[in-house]
Image: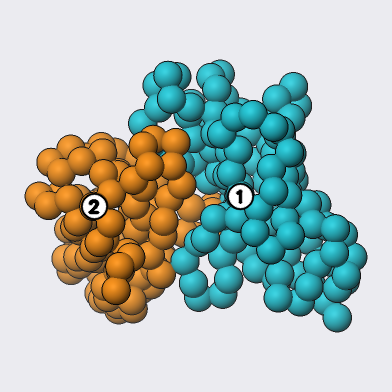
Chain colours: A orange, B cyan
């Protein structure tokens, strides 16, 4: 089905482990984004990408790495997970130029023990 | 830099009553404004957006919002709420094209709307 999908939907890991959250969209949208959602903070932008091989930092990029070798995929990697990275992560994409709305995935709930 | 402030973290209201969720933004350049809704354990979906033109914007599910440039506000309203409107609501801002737009959306902290029977 067309849309934006995230995997895994739920993940439990331990401090210090590497974790990768996957994001795939089928619309060929140029823009893709990673947000984290925490109580009292709303959604905060981690990284975004305007096109394949173009990425930039958002508000809270420390501890995260992204890549975008293909337009449809935008994985987010936590190189060494910390408890403070326990959160719900949302991937989004936007295709109608820079004025367009963002379309969100269903989220990935990550727990770091 | 831009910022968004949602003035109420929780808004309890009885079914069929009117509701207003308040949003103020800060920006030195022209902006686009959005309201998103998040139902439990789901992603966000767009309620409405303001890009230009009429300052009163109508969205899905009977919601509307009014852009007030002088007060830098974009409050969301519904004349009569239903139980099914219980959700988290997010106001968001994006720099307009021609003002250094990068496509990224900045969100407020969210307002939980609790509709009671």
Chain letter of the residue beneath label 2 in the structure image = A
What residue is pinned by disc 2? A28
Could you tell me which chain the residue with mark 1 belongs to?
B
Write the residue at 46% across / 59% down.
A37
Task: Name which residue lies at 25% across and 61% down.
Answer: A26
**Number of residues whose C-alpha sits closer than 10 Å to that of mark 2, classed few (under 14), some (14–19) or many (20 or more):** some
Q: Quadrant of the C terminus of chain A?
A: bottom left
Residue A23, percent from left and from top:
25, 63
Residue B64 numbered tag = none
A55 relative to B41 in the view: left or right:
left
Question: A36 or A14: which is nearer to us?
Answer: A36
Which quadrant of the figure has residue A30? top left
Residue B19 makes an appearance in the image: yes
Q: Residue furthest left?
A: A69
Name the residue located 33 percent from the left edge and 78 percent from the top edge: A10
Q: Give the quadrant of residue B92.
A: top right
Residue of label 1: B48
Task: Tell me if I can see residue A85 in this picture.
Answer: no
């Amino acid at each position: 089905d067309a849309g934006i999908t995230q995997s895994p939907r739920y993940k439990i890991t331990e401090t210090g482990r590497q974790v990768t959250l996957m994001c795939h969209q089928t619309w060929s949208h140029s823009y893709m984004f990673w947000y984290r959602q925490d109580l009292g903070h709303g959604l905060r932008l981690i990284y975004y990408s305007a096109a394949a091989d173009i990425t930039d930092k958002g508000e809270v990029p420390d501890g995260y790495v992204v890549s975008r070798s293909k337009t449809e995929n935008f994985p987010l990697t936590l190189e060494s997970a910390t408890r403070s990275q326990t959160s719900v992560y949302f991937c989004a994409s936007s295709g109608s130029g820079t004025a367009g709305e963002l379309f969100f995935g269903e989220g990935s709930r990550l727990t770091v023990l | 830099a831009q910022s968004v402030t949602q003035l109420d973290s929780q808004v309890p209201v009885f079914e069929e009553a009117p509701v207003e969720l308040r949003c103020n933004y800060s920006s030195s350049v022209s902006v686009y404004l959005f309201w998103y809704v998040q139902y439990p354990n789901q992603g966000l979906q767009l309620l409405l957006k303001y890009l230009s033109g009429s300052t009163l914007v109508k969205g899905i599910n009977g919601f509307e919002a009014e852009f007030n440039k002088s007060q830098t506000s974009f409050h969301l309203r519904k004349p009569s709420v239903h139980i099914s409107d219980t959700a988290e609501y997010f106001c968001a801002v994006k720099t307009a094209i021609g003002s250094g737009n990068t496509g990224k959306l900045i969100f407020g902290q969210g307002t939980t709307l609790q509709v009671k029977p």
